[in-house]
Image (cartoon, helix red, strand yellow):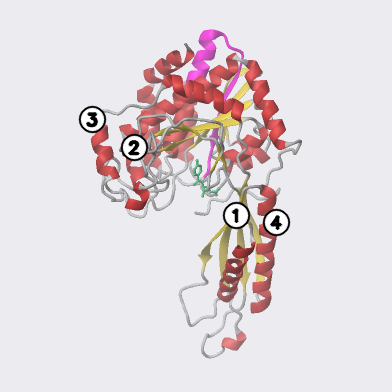
């Protein structure tokens, strides 16, 4: 049975993978500045016999590790970026930053990137042992958080020859991620006016801050008149300074427009641009619109999800010892009532547990993800499947200090190693059954309805490191 052998391979190298993950946890580098994390993953791939190309797609921290030759080509996607301001000491049930103001792995990408590496290493070993034909590639994908690194990589054509792709995400539960996510555009609106003394000569000034405020008010009215699935958020990234007695000559807002389909995002974005121009007209300022990044919605693939589910069922779920469950209980006790209400149950009236002990049943139904992921762009080019494993306590949320804390402990490591096994087993199953690859590709074509992938990021826009 291939799942058994894959499990052994990953367990044999568990210390290596745990050390890689813990190092990335400590580096905690944010989008497009993940130099140490990317280098550690790249070097580990090289020491495991992969050929590594660094700086792919013109992005310094993007890389591809490759083993084998010819088709089929399987892409295993890894992420490794952290979140700013989320520093937290590991393994404790009290919120306390490790480095005040520092970064932290609030989305578990230290686990994500490392499990994908473990999967790639196991697939390689399995291919060697069984004389399997094909190529396994590890895609080192930087800047998922607010950066859409994979969309830039897709625009550079790096996924064009891939036959199928796999990814996963650490969570508080075990599941097949049968999701459709929201496509999005992230765009700066930069207003320029004229400074002046706010009391002596306000009539000579033109306020860029007024323009930002009026734009936001305008968009808040727009919200009533867009499809309910859409989301428009903004951050005021420059308020024009700290002095109320100076008419603010420069101010800017960063907008994130989301909707189920890229076309819908485009339509709402055009209306947001009109509002920005209206705000500039009202305030006699100039507006510059600077596209930051975008990503596509995920196209699910049931053929691959079924293969992944079968393999996940065979592998079972991560099982925790007493010490781990003690920590899980302490951390879960810090969740709010509302957070606890989002907990998973095995049965509708099942008991409340700190760590889940089951794999959620997969029935092919789609659940919307009220969020976005740049895995979406890959899923338009090659059939893609994803899973989650339980790395964190039941009911805990993404981007929380509890995730940072547990992402550096054996709870996180267990879920990570398990995800590596699921991804590697799924890849091997597909490689062993080329007809499944053909079926998965046919499903993708049918879902796209002949519409080819078009990267939503305009030519010329480069990844930005801004936090
Ligand atoms: N399996 C998941 C993958 C991504 C996310 C997530 O939170 N993504 C960010 C991405 C933001 C972006 O695309 O800029 C978001 O939705 O805000 C959540 C679950």
Q: Residue at x 62, y 35 (%)?
A: 379
Q: Nearer the viewer, residue 310 or 418?
A: 310
Q: Which residues are magenta?
A: 120-144
Instruction: Measure the alpha-carbon separation of dots 1 and 3.
Output: 44 Å
Q: Nearer the viewer, residue 429 or 116?
A: 429
State the image quarter where residue 382 is shown: top right
State the image quarter where residue 320 is shown: top left
Question: Which label is found at residue 408?
Answer: 2
- Kindly identify which residue carries mark 3: 322
- Kindly identify which residue carries mark 1: 230
First in residue order: circle 1 vs circle 4: 1
Q: Is residue 387 at all visible to an observer of this figure?
A: yes
Q: Is residue 75 left or right of residue 24?
A: right
- Kindly identify which residue carries mark 4: 267
First in residue order: circle 2 vs circle 1: 1
Q: Secondary structure at mark 4?
A: helix
First in residue order: circle 4 vs circle 2: 4
């Amino acid at each position: 049975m291939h799942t058994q052998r894959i499990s052994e391979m990953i367990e044999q190298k568990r210390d290596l993978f745990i050390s890689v993950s813990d190092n990335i946890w400590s580096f905690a580098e944010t989008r497009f500045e993940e130099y140490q994390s990317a280098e550690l993953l790249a070097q580990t791939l090289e020491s495991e016999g992969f050929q590594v190309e660094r700086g792919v797609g013109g992005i310094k921290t993007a890389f591809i590790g490759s083993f084998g030759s010819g088709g089929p080509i399987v892409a295993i996607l890894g992420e490794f970026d952290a979140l700013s301001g989320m520093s937290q000491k590991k393994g404790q049930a009290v919120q306390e930053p490790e480095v005040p103001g520092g970064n932290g792995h609030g989305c578990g990408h230290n686990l994500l990137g490392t499990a994908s590496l473990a999967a790639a290493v196991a697939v390689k070993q399995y291919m060697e042992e069984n004389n399997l034909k094909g190529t396994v590639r590890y895609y080192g994908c930087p800047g998922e958080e607010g950066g859409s690194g994979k969309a830039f990589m897709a625009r550079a054509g790096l996924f064009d020859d891939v036959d199928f792709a796999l990814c996963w995400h650490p969570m508080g539960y075990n599941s097949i991620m049968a999701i459709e996510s929201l496509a999005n555009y992230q765009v700066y609106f930069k207003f320029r006016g004229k400074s002046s003394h706010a009391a002596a000569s306000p009539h000579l000034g033109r306020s860029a801050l007024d323009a930002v405020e009026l734009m936001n008010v305008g968009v808040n009215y727009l919200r009533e008149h867009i499809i309910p699935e859409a989301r428009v958020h903004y951050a005021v990234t420059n308020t024009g300074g700290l002095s109320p007695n100076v008419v603010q000559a420069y101010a800017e807002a960063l907008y994130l427009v989301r909707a189920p389909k890229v076309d819908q995002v485009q339509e709402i974005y055009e209306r947001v641009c009109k509002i920005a121009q209206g705000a500039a007209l009202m305030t006699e300022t100039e507006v510059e619109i600077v596209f930051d990044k975008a990503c596509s919605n995920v196209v699910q693939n049931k053929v691959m999800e079924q293969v992944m589910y079968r393999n996940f069922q065979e592998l079972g779920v991560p099982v925790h010892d007493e010490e781990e469950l003690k920590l899980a209980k302490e951390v879960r006790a810090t969740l709010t009532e509302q957070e606890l209400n989002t907990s998973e149950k095995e049965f509708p009236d099942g008991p409340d547990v700190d760590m889940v002990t089951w794999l959620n049943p997969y029935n092919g139904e789609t659940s919307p993800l009220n969020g976005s992921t740049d895995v979406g762009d890959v899923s338009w080019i090659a059939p893609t499947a994803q899973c989650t494993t339980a790395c964190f306590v039941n009911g805990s949320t993404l981007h929380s200090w509890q995730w940072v804390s547990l992402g550096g402990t054996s709870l996180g490591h267990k879920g990570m190693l398990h995800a590596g096994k699921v991804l590697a087993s799924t890849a091997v199953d597909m490689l062993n059954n080329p007809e499944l690859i053909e079926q998965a590709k046919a499903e993708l074509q049918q879902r796209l309805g002949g519409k080819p992938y078009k990267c939503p990021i305009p030519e010329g826009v480069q990844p930005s490191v801004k936090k």
